[in-house]
Amino acid sequence: MKNLLCARLWLAVSLSCIGEPALAVLPPQAGVGPAAALPPAGVAAVPQPAEEGLRFETIAPGVHLIWTPPIPGFERRKAKVVVAEFDTFTALIEAPWDDRSVRQILRTIELRIPGKPVRFALHSHHHDHSIQAVDPLLAAGATIVTSPWNLEELVKLTADEGTLRRRAIVVKDRFEIGDRTNRLIVHVLRRGPAPDGWDVPTPEYMVFEVPERDLLVSGCLYNKPKETHEVISGRKRALSRFISEKGVSAGTLVPTNTTSELGFEDVCTLQMLHDSLIEGLDPAEVSRQWGAVTAEEMRARLGEIVQEHEARKTRAFDFLVCQSKLVVDGRPGHALVWLDAASRLHPSDPYLWYESGNRAWELGQFDDAERRWARAVDAARDAIERGELREGIDEKRAGK
Ligand SMILES: [Zn+2]
C-alpha cells in the first residue's frame, strides 16, 4: 500500500466533493466527435471556440495556478501546479499524474503565456501528485530541478536516463532562478530530527519561495479545509519552524495537493497556518488525553467523543492521523474506540473501517476484523481504492 497516507488524504477529503461536477475546463480532444470532421469542399468551416486549456488563474504578478485535469479511473484526485513567469521564460512547479496530464499543463502554459517556454521544471517530492512525468518536460526543452535523492526517483520515470541526468540541476541545499522581473528560490528540506532535519513526508522535500511576491509553494506540507482546521501534523510544525528560522517570505502559502473542488483553500496565508497550529486537532494531545483512562473506560464515553467531534467538524482524515498516533503510542484498544467514534460520523469512509479492522485483528478479534474489512471494501469508491484496500487486508492476514 505504497503512498497510502497520501492516498488517504485524497480519499478522506473526497467525501466532501461527492456530487460536484467534474473539475476543470478540458481542452477539446483533437480527432474526437463531430467537430473533428472536415467540412465538405466549398462549405465555410464553422468557427471553433478558442482553445482555453485547463483552469488557469493568476494569484500574484508573474505567479499563476493551473488545476490538473481529472485522471481516468481516479477522478476524485485533484491537484494544482504553479507557474512562475520571468522575462523570457517560465518555471513550472509540479508535474503530476501522468504524461497526458503534463502535456495538457504544458499546452495551457503555451496558450496563456505565449512566447515564454518552460525553461525549468521543479517538483516538491516524488509522489504522483507532485511529479509522475519527466519525458514530456524533457521533450519541451525544460531543465529538471531536483535534489539528489529525488533524482534517483525521477530516473524510474524516464525512458531516457542519459538526457535526464545531463539536463537535471541537482540542488543540495538552495538554488535560485532569477532575472529582472522575478525570483524563485528552491529550498531542500532533508527529513530528520531537529535542529538540522525536518519532519517532511519524504527523505528530501523541496519548497519554492517567490520572495518578491511574499509567497511560498509548499506542496503538501500545509492544507486548510475551508470550514475548519486540519489536524496538526509534524509537517505543519516543520513548515512553520522553517519559515521563521530561515526568514523565508511566505505571507501567501500555496499547497499544490488539494483544491477548492475538494473543499480546501486553493491559496492559504501564514496567518492561517499559525491559526491551524492553535485550533487544529493535536494527535499527541488526543493520545495523552485518552491514554489517561483504559480502553474500556474510553468506550463508555464513545457518545461524548462523537458529540465533541461532530461539533468540531473533525474529518475522517483527521481521525486517521490521530489514530496513527494512538497506535504508535501502543494503544490499539484506544485506537479502535476512536475509530468507532469516527465511523459513526463518517460511516461511508472506507479507510476508517479498514484501520478499525486492522486494530481488531491486532487485538485478536479476527471475526470482528473480517466484518470491518468487508465494510471497508464495500465502501470503496472505485476499483483503485478497492484494490488498495484488498492488498492491505491480504498483507495483514498473511502476517497472522
Ligand atoms: Zn505526497
Image (cartoon, rainbow, N blue to C red):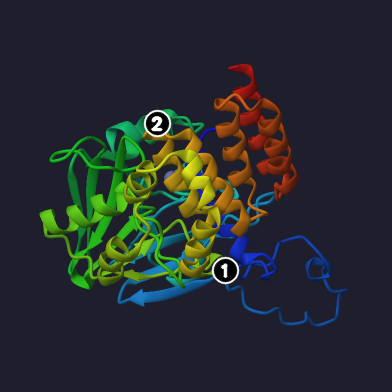
Q: Is residue 309 left or right of residue 203?
A: right
Task: Name the outermost residue toward the right.
Answer: 40
In the picture, the disc for residue 53 is 1
Disc tally is 2
Mark whose residue sits in front, 1 or 2:
2
Image quarter for ligand 1: top left
The residue closer to the viewer here, 297 or 334, is 297
In the rendering, at what x and y percent does residue 81 appear?
44, 60
Label whose residue precedes the other's in the sequence (1 or 2): 1
Quarter of the image with the N terminus in it: top right
Label 2 crowd (10 A; few <14 / some 14-19 / many >=20): few
Q: Are marks 1 and 2 in contact (CB under 8 Å)?
A: no
Q: Is residue 61 left or right of residue 390?
A: left
Q: Which residue is more in the foreground, 48 or 374? A: 374
56 vs 325: above or below:
below
| Secondary structure state at the residue bearing disc 1 | loop
- Residue placed at 55% from the left, 58% from the top? 303
Instruction: Please name whichever residue, 320 or 303, is drawn nearer the observer in this view of the structure.
Output: 303
Taking the image as drawn, is residue 56 in sight?
A: yes
Q: Say what amino acid the circle numbered 1 marks.
A: Gly
Element type at marker 2? Answer: loop
